[in-house]
Image: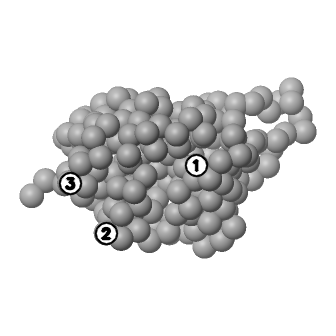
């Protein structure tokens, strides 16, 4: 039986680029703002770009919060957060000073750099992901593989055991995290060519 993948549409960005990437892998996700589609899914991919507070407000308005919490915490089904989607898994964000889902122990902070000439904010472009811990999400992905980033905030993990990869942009930050059925990546696998496609396939196969 084919895996049912849902991409919740909560009005925050790059949903259809993720959808197209999955379609190229012969995975046909359901992109929907209907919470009932989340309930029917086997796996969820939660992408997003934009403002943390606005994203949480949209999720409340669309009545997705309780459904997502049940999917992740009660039913223990796999979820992959991408960029803002990963950040929403945190306890809290400085962007709007608002609570997130609290699935990952940590907070979201604005990227701070000392050398503003060399390191521009937002962090945009290709950068390496240094593997800290083995995971099914990283199967057959070499250490220091390059992925595409576009973000001004980053996740700070309170528990090192949750960190799969780290990336350096003047300072070091978690670029992929995992806890049980919960996965998150700060980079955009849908924009990261073959390596990104391999990571998405690993999640679908998990």
Residue nearer the viewer, 192 or 103: 103
Task: Name the residue located 46 percent from the left edge and 59 percent from the top edge.
Answer: 183
Task: Name the residue located 65 percent from the left edge and 48 percent from the top edge.
Answer: 98
Residue nearer the viewer, 118 or 94: 94
Task: Name the residue located 47 percent from the left edge and 32 percent from the top edge.
Answer: 12
Task: Name the residue located 35 percent from the left edge and 41 percent from the top edge.
Answer: 8
On screen, residue 2 above or below 187: below
Q: How far apart are marks 2 and 1 (CA)?
A: 21 Å
Which label lies toward us, 1 or 3? 3
Left or right, 181 with respect to 173, comes to left
Position of the N terminus by quadrant: bottom left
For label 3, the residue is 40
Earlier-in-chain disc, 3 versus 2: 3
Left or right, 130 with respect to 113, comes to left
Earlier-in-chain disc, 1 versus 3: 3
Give the image location of residue 168, x and y in percent: 72, 48
Q: Which colour scheme is used?
A: one colour
Q: How far apart are marks 1 and 3 (CA)?
A: 24 Å
Q: Residue 87's mark?
A: 1
For label 2, the residue is 75
Q: Is mark 2 on a helix, strand or loop?
A: loop
Q: Can residue 132 be seen in this view?
A: no
Q: Residues within 10 Å of mark 3 (few under 14, many from 20)?
A: few
Residue 76 found in image quarter: bottom left
Residue located farthest toward the left when viewing the structure as drawn: 1
The total number of labels drawn is: 3
Residue nearer the viewer, 120 or 134: 120
């Amino acid at each position: 039986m084919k895996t049912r993948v849902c991409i919740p549409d909560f009005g925050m960005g790059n949903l259809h680029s993720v959808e197209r990437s999955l379609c190229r892998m012969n995975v046909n996700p359901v992109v929907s703002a209907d919470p009932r589609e989340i309930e029917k899914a086997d796996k969820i991919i939660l992408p997003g770009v934009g403002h943390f507070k606005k994203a949480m407000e949209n999720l409340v308005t669309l009545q997705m919060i309780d459904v997502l919490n049940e999917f992740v915490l009660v039913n223990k089904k796999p979820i992959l957060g991408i960029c803002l989607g990963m950040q929403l898994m945190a306890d809290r964000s400085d962007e709007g000073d608002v609570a997130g889902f609290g699935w990952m122990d940590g907070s979201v902070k604005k990227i701070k750099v000392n050398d503003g000439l060399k390191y521009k904010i937002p962090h945009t472009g290709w950068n390496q992901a240094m593997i800290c811990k083995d995971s099914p999400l990283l199967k057959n992905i070499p250490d220091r593989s390059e992925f595409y980033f576009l973000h001004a905030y980053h996740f700070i993990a309170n528990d090192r055991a949750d960190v799969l990869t780290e990336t350096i942009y003047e300072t070091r930050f978690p670029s992929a995290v995992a806890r049980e059925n919960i996965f998150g990546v700060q980079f955009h696998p849908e924009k990261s060519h073959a390596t990104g496609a391999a990571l998405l396939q690993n999640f679908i196969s998990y």
